[in-house]
């Protein structure tokens, strides 16, 4: 193991034990510093993401920087209330007493972030760690190397290493860090690596938040507004070239509206990319990921799109028909702008198929029938859901975002980020003025009757 990582954690643990991070005032100052740093370096981050993924400045601000700045402001507005001890009723048997719940920082946190939204998915968990009063070691992805370098430089200029440290490198670096005794681990990535993170955390009994992904389905029933549904599904699939953990992964559509949907989807894509010019679209992150996605095109017939450009690592937004359930695209997360389409006659068939796999990170349903919506919500388990839209449920700081089962464990955003890096302590304060003798021996019949009367 690289001793420098051990030294880094030792330095952070020593700093945390000084209590410097505990005051609300300190945490707000650090959030302000982060806010100002992101604002000042917005141009640098936009250029880095352009180099890594051909990400447009508009999309970068909409899905990365803007969300981060909004999250920081939300924490600054609410942090004092979250950190304040919450008084609750103590047990009747222990009166007179004062009972309270206090949110305490776990301590030294490890945050492992992915490449697909390297600013957003690095800084949103970090905001939670800062807000909770933790120190943090941030391990960023080697794939988005320009953004990793830019963000590492920004955080290095903004924070002292005993408080926030950034580590770069590949899987070997992650494994080395996971062998250390952190107080909290927050991981965003795929399920395979998530299992490795959980196994490593078990050695130290470290609490873990896993933000994974998987196959998030879209259901379109016969009552849906097809034109709006196609446009919003296309938005979710084209965003970041489909490299989004909550991107619509596959489509289950009522057989009677399939043809109408295909035309509406084609129309939506043409509106997004006038004259068929896809040069502004995000590229796939690297050649290996591109070739994997390109192979998935063979899982069906492209009825919309279908072209690829290896030089630009670009895949045209594609809708696949005649897809079999045992095809490759139905057995792995797509993570590309390719949408496989399957039809159903009865809603129960679609629901049963979704339930046969892992619990999805997101479910999207397009319908104007309240009974259909109620049935889907009642019978499916998922991390989050949008009715008549895609993606946007994860943008609210007032709602938790996270998976369940194979799509993850734990949640964050807003107060849930604060709680993800906090342990809630229960504290009971007793008076010395009164000492009720019911709990003390000898246990007489009178005491037994009185205890039963009080604790019934």
Image (tube, rainbow, N blue to C red):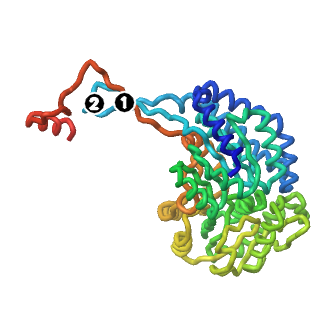
Closer to us: 365 or 211: 211
Which residue appears at 68% of the width and 34% of the height?
162
Label 1: which secondary element:
strand
Q: At 77% across and 37% down in the image, what residue appears?
A: 156
Question: Spatial distance from mark 1 to mark 2, Cα to Cα?
Answer: 9 Å
Residue 104: percent from left, percent from top:
52, 34
Q: Residue furthest left?
A: 445
Pick the residue in front: 21 or 360: 21
The one of 249 and 263 positioned closer to us in this rendering:
249
- Seen in the image, is 383 located left or right of residue 268? left
Numbered tag placed on residue 94 in the rendering = 2
**Quarter assignment of residue 4:** top right
The correct choice, above or below, for 348 with respect to 58 in the image is below
Answer yes or no: is residue 384 visible.
no
Disc 2 secondary structure class: helix
Local packing at callout 1 (Cα closer than 10 Å; few below 14, some 14-19, many 20+) is some
Dot 1 and dot 2 residues touching (CB under 8 Å): yes
Residue 379 visible = yes
Q: In the picture provided, is 49 more to the left or to the right than 323?
A: right
């Amino acid at each position: 193991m690289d001793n420098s990582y051990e030294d880094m954690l030792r330095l952070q643990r020593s700093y945390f034990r000084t209590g410097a991070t505990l005051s609300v005032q300190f945490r707000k100052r650090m959030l302000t510093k982060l806010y100002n740093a992101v604002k000042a370096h917005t141009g640098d981050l936009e250029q880095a993401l352009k180099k890594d993924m051909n990400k447009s400045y508009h999309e970068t601000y909409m899905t990365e920087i803007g969300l981060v700045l909004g999250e920081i402001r939300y924490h600054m507005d609410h942090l004092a209330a979250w950190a304040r001890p919450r008084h609750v009723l103590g047990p009747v048997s222990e009166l007179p007493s004062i009972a309270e719940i206090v949110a305490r920082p776990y301590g030294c946190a490890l945050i492992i972030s992915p490449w697909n939204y390297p600013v957003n998915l690095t800084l949103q968990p970090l905001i939670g760690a800062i807000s909770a009063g933790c120190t943090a070691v941030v391990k960023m992805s080697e794939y988005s190397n320009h953004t990793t370098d830019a963000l590492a430089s920004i955080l290095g200029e903004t924070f002292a290493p005993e408080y926030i440290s950034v580590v770069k490198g590949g899987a070997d670096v992650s494994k080395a860090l996971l062998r250390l005794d952190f107080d909290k681990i927050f991981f965003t990535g795929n399920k395979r690596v998530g299992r490795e993170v959980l196994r490593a955390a078990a050695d130290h009994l470290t609490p873990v938040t896993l933000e994974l992904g998987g196959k998030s389905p879209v259901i379109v029933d016969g009552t849906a507004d097809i034109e709006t549904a196609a446009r919003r599904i296309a938005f979710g699939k084209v965003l970041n070239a489909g490299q989004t953990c909550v991107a619509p992964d596959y489509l289950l559509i009522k057989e009677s509206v399939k043809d109408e949907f295909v035309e509406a989807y084609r129309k939506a894509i043409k509106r997004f990319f006038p004259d068929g010019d896809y040069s502004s679209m995000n590229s796939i992150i690297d050649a290996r990921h591109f070739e994997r996605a390109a192979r998935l095109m063979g899982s069906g017939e492209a009825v919309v799109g279908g072209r690829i450009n290896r030089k630009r690592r670009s895949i045209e937004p594609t809708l696949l028909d005649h897809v079999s359930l045992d095809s490759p695209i139905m057995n792995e997360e797509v993570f590309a702008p390719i949408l496989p389409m399957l039809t159903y006659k009865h809603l129960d068939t679609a629901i049963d198929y979704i339930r046969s796999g892992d619990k999805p990170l997101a479910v999207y349903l397009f319908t104007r029938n309240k009974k259909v919506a109620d049935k889907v919500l009642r019978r499916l388990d998922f991390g989050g859901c949008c009715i008549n839209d895609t993606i946007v449920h994860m943008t609210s700081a007032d709602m938790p975002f996270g998976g369940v089962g194979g799509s993850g464990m734990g949640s964050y955003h807003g107060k849930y980020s604060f709680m993800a890096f906090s342990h809630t302590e229960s504290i009971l304060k007793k008076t010395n003025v009164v000492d009720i003798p019911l709990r003390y021996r000898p246990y007489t019949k009178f005491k037994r009757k009185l205890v039963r009367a009080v604790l019934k």
